[in-house]
Image (cartoon, helix red, strand yellow):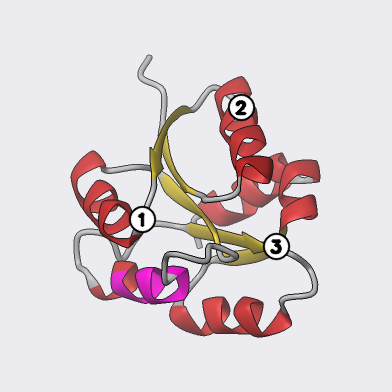
């Protein structure tokens, strides 16, 4: 059986590497993106099941990338789980407005990953 692919964008090693490890523990193949262009290109070419994105990245416009994922017919269907420090309420709101499926704090994403995946992947 083929493992589902998760695309993870992060700049900060923690929680990024922890998230990669947790997804692998849950049976996902994982590919990572390191900047805006690779995030968009990988989402279109790799055909992941979902995208997890760190909104707190300083060198990448993650909210803009979420918006572009939603506008592209090849990626508009992808669930996007965005995460950031809890104190970053403005970034959380901007991600929701850009089309993120779920937005969570970086602490919650690690503690409740399975529930977030289930919710994001739920077919409505």
Q: Residues within 10 Å of mark 3 (few under 14, many from 20)?
A: many
Q: Is residue 122 visible?
A: no
Mark 3, residue position:
104
The single residue placed furthest to the top in the displayed view is: 1
Q: Which residue is mark 1?
A: 35
Q: Is residue 44 above or below residue 92?
A: above
Task: Say above or below: 54 vs 94.
Answer: above
Query: What residue do we see at 52% from left, 51% from top?
Result: 11
The verdict on residue 67 being magenta is yes
Q: Is residue 114 above or below residue 86?
A: above
The nearer-to-camera label among 1 and 2 is 1
Q: Secondary structure at mark 1?
A: loop
| Prevailing secondary structure class for the magenta stretch in the rendered image | helix
Please report whichever mark, 3 or 2, sits nearer to the chain's N-terminal start. 2
Residue 94 part of the magenta segment? no
- Whole-Å distance between the Cαs marked 1 and 3? 21 Å
Q: Quadrant of the N terminus?
A: top left
**Spot occupied by residue 34 in the image (x, y as percentages of width and height):** 39, 48
Q: Position of residue 30 (x, y in %)?
A: 44, 31
Question: Does the rendering let one see residue 51?
Answer: yes
The circle on residue 21 is 2
- Badge 1: residue crowd in 10 Å (few <14, some 14–19, many ≥20): some
Magenta stretch, residue numbers: 62-68
Q: Does the residue at mark 1 contact the one at mark 3 (Cβ under 8 Å)?
A: no
The residue at the point 74 percent across, 64 percent down is 85
Identify the element where label 3 is drawn: strand
In the image, is 4 to the left or to the right of 96? left
């Amino acid at each position: 059986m083929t493992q589902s692919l998760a695309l993870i964008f992060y700049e900060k090693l923690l929680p990024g590497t922890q998230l990669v490890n947790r997804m692998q523990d849950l049976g996902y193949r994982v590919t990572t993106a390191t900047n805006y262009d690779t995030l968009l290109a990988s989402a279109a070419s790799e055909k992941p099941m979902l995208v997890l994105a760190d909104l707190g990245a300083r060198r990448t416009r993650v909210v803009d990338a979420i918006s572009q994922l939603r506008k592209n017919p090849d990626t508009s269907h992808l669930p996007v789980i965005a995460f950031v420090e809890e104190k970053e309420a403005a970034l959380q709101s901007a991600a929701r407005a850009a089309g993120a499926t779920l937005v969570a704090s970086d602490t919650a994403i690690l503690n409740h990953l399975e529930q977030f995946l289930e919710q994001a992947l739920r077919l409505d």
